[in-house]
Image (spheres, helix red, strand yellow):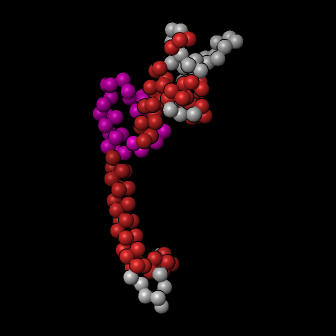
């Protein structure tokens, strides 16, 4: 960071990264983001590299990576560890596929119960409520 023209206060940095200030501080506590030194009598300054890093973290989180996994990806970001990064992504993909299968089963069960509720007779209890009691 060469001048204050290309650096930001934490508030401006957070806004540029699309997060709030507490998220910046949280990432610093988790060591996903370094905390710059405070110059004597001044405020900490952040640059475009830090903005890009926070955006990377948020993108990885949107793909389902945990913060620990994001930290691993950040350690692998030099380009020489693509196989390790792909291995992490393959684990995440397997988890997503498992969740999708679970959601599909849930959708099928709920759709059937909703259909049964619509076809019920007045003297019979609600099939949805009855099935939840049976579990």
Q: Is residue 45 above or below residue 65?
A: above
- Report whether 130 appears left or right of 119: right
Q: Residue at x 47, y 88 (%)?
A: 122
Q: Is residue 68 magenta?
A: yes
Quarter occupied by residue 88 = top left
Q: Residue at x 59, y 24 (%)?
A: 10
Q: Is residue 96 above or below residue 83?
A: below
User: Residue 102 placed where, x, y %?
Assistant: 37, 61
Quarter occupied by residue 21 = top right
Q: Is residue 102 magenta?
A: no
Q: Is residue 33 above or below residue 97?
A: above
Residue 93 vs residue 24, the one in the foreground: 24
* Residue 134 can be seen, yes or no: no
User: Residue 9 placed where, x, y %?
Assistant: 59, 21
- Report whether 50 appears left or right of 39: left
* Residue 93 can be seen, yes or no: yes
Q: Residue at x 42, y 84 (%)?
A: 120
Magenta region, residue range? 63-92
């Amino acid at each position: 960071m060469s001048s204050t023209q290309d650096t930001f206060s934490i508030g401006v940095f957070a806004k540029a990264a699309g997060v709030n200030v507490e998220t910046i501080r949280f990432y610093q506590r988790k060591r996903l983001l370094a905390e710059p030194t405070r110059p004597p009598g001044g405020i900490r300054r952040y640059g475009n590299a830090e903005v890009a890093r926070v955006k990377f973290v948020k993108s990885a989180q949107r793909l389902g990576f945990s913060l620990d996994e994001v930290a691993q990806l950040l350690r692998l970001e030099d380009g020489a560890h693509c196989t390790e990064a792909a291995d992490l992504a393959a684990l995440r993909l397997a988890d997503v596929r498992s969740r999708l299968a679970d959601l599909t089963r849930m959708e099928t069960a709920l759709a059937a119960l909703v259909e049964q509720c619509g076809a019920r007779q007045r003297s019979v209890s609600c099939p949805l409520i009855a099935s939840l009691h049976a579990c």
